[in-house]
Amino acid sequence: MKVLVIGSGGREHALLWRLAQSPSVTEVYAITGNDGMSDVAHLIPVKGHEDIIDFARLMNVDLTVAGPETVLTEGLADEFAEKGLAFFGPSKAAARIEGSKGFAKNLMKKYGVPTAAYEVFTDEDKAVEYLKANKKYPIVIKADGLAAGKGVIIAQTEKEAIDTVKDMLEGHSFGGAGRSVVIEEFMEGEEASVLCFCDGTTVVPMVSSQDHKRIYDGDKGPNTGGMGAYAPAPVMTDDMMDEVKVKILRPMMAAMKKEGYPFVGCLYAGLMITDEGPKVVEFNCRFGDPETEAVLPLFDGDLAQVMLDCVHGKLTKEEVKWKKGCAVDVVMASEGYPASHSSGEVISGLEEAKATGCLVFHAGTMKKNGEYLVNGGRVLNVVALAPTLAEAKAKAYEGVSKIHWRGVQYRKDIADKGLHHLEEKK
Ligand code: AMP
Ligand code: GLY
C-alpha cells in the first residue's frame, strides 16, 4: 500500500512512523511534512486540495490520512470520496463535531450523551442576562468556531464572564469564531483523552491517554497545544472505559449515522472524569497532539489496514491490538511559547537522545546545512516506552536531558498524575 499523511507536526511524524511499519505499506508520503520526517517518509511540497488530490491520484496512493482538523472541516474527505480515493478522516458534515462546539453540544443533548449543561448565544443582551441569573462560578465560555484550542475561558466571576462574552460577541477576540458563544457549567474532575477508530458504524477505542495543556508544571500558566502526554491513563480504569463506550462512544457513533453524517476516521473524545461519571469536554474530528505520539507507539497491528477497513466500513475490534506497557511523551518547546516562539537556534543531542532508546518525533524543526534548527513553538516530542509508567517517565526524561538549544522549555512533571493514581491504588 502507498500511504499519504497530510500535516507537519509531531502527531503526523508519529503517524508516518507507525504507518511505515505496517506490513501492508510499501511507500509513505507526507504533505508537506517537516524535515525531521524524512527518516520515514518522502516529503511532498504541494499545497491546496486540488494539488493534493492530483498527487494521490497520479501516484496511485491507496490511503490518505489527515492530521489537522482544518482540511477536514474544509471538506477534503468529501473531495477524495468524489474521486473514489480512500481517505481516513470524516466528511465535512461529520467534522462539524469539532468545527462547531454548538453543533456538538446540541447533538449530545439530543442523544443524551453526558456533557456539561450549556446554552448557545449570539445575542449579547441575552447572554449577559443569563450570566447575571447564574449563581455558580467559575463558568466556562467558549467561542463557537475553531479557535486553535484557545477559544475557551474559565471565568471566575460574573464580571469576568460578562466581559469575555462581550469581547467574543463583538468580535474582538477569536475573530469570526467568537460570534456565537457557548456558556457551560464548569466540570470538576480529571481529564482524559480517548481516541477511537471509527468506520461510520463501529467504534473501537485506542488505549486511553492524558494531555498536559498548560505550559508550566502543576498545570500552571497559559494553555498550549499540549506539553506532553502519557498512555494508558490510570484514571481511565477498565470499568470507566466500559462506561465511556456505553454512554458516550457508541451513542455518538449511532447518532451521527442516524443524522446522515456517519463518522469515519479518528474520533477524539476529550473527557472529564467527574464524581458523576465520565462527561464529554469536547470532541475532535482527528488524532490528538500530543496524545498520538504516546498512543501509537503502543499500537500493535497493521495500522494502514485498520484505517483502510475504517474507510470501507469493515472495522473489527479484533484487528486493533495493543502492546503491554506504557508510553510517555515529553514535548520540548521553544522560548516564548505559547505566546510566541523563537526560531533558528541549533538543536544538539538528537542522536544521543535516540541512543537512549527514545523515539524523537519532530514538530517545529527545519534542517539547514546538516543541522536541525528550531522552527516553531512545539519543537520535538521525546517518547519512551517501558513496562511501567514510572520507568517510561524516567526514560523519556533521560532522552530529553540529551537535547539542548538556547531557550528550550519543557515540563518536568509529565505523567505525574498517572503515577499518583497508581500510588493510591497500592
Ligand atoms: P476545549 O477546547 O473545549 O477542550 O476546552 C479547553 C480546556 O478547557 C479543556 O481541556 C478543559 O481543561 C477546559 N474546559 C473546557 N470545558 C470545561 C468545562 N465545562 N468544565 C471544566 N473545564 C473545562
Ligand atoms: N491534545 C489536544 C488536541 O489535540 O486538541
Image (cartoon, rainbow, N blue to C red):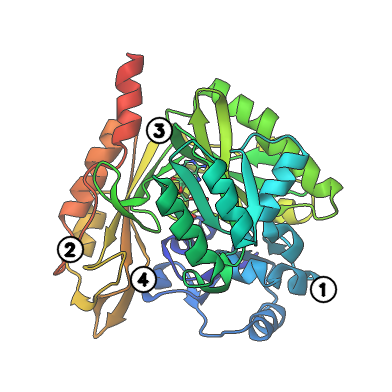
Mark 2, secondary structure of its residue:
loop
- For discs 2 and 1, the disc positioned in front in the rendered view: 1
Point out the image quarter for the C terminus. Answer: top left
Residue 82, numbered circle? 1
Looking at the rendered structure, the secondary structure element under dot 4 is: helix
Q: On the image, numbered disc 3 is attached to which residue? A: 325
Which badge, 3 or 4, is on the more N-terminal residue?
4
Q: Please name the residue that numbered disc 4 is placed on.
A: 36
Which of pointers 1 and 4 lies earlier in the amino acid sequence?
4
Residue matched to label 2: 349
Q: Position of residue 58 (x, y in %)?
A: 70, 83
Relative horizontal placement of residue 392, taking residue 111 as reference (left or right): left
Against 45, residue 419 (above or below) is above
The earlier-in-sequence mark between 2 and 1 is 1
- Measure how far apart labels 3 and 4 are at the Cα level: 27 Å
> Which is more N-terminal, label 2 or label 3?
3
- What amino acid is found at the position of numbered circle 3 in the picture? Gly
Q: Which mark is residue 185?
A: none
Is residue 233 depicted above or below 401 in this figure?
above
Q: CA distance from mark 2 to mark 1?
A: 46 Å
Q: Position of residue 181 (x, y in %)?
A: 59, 58
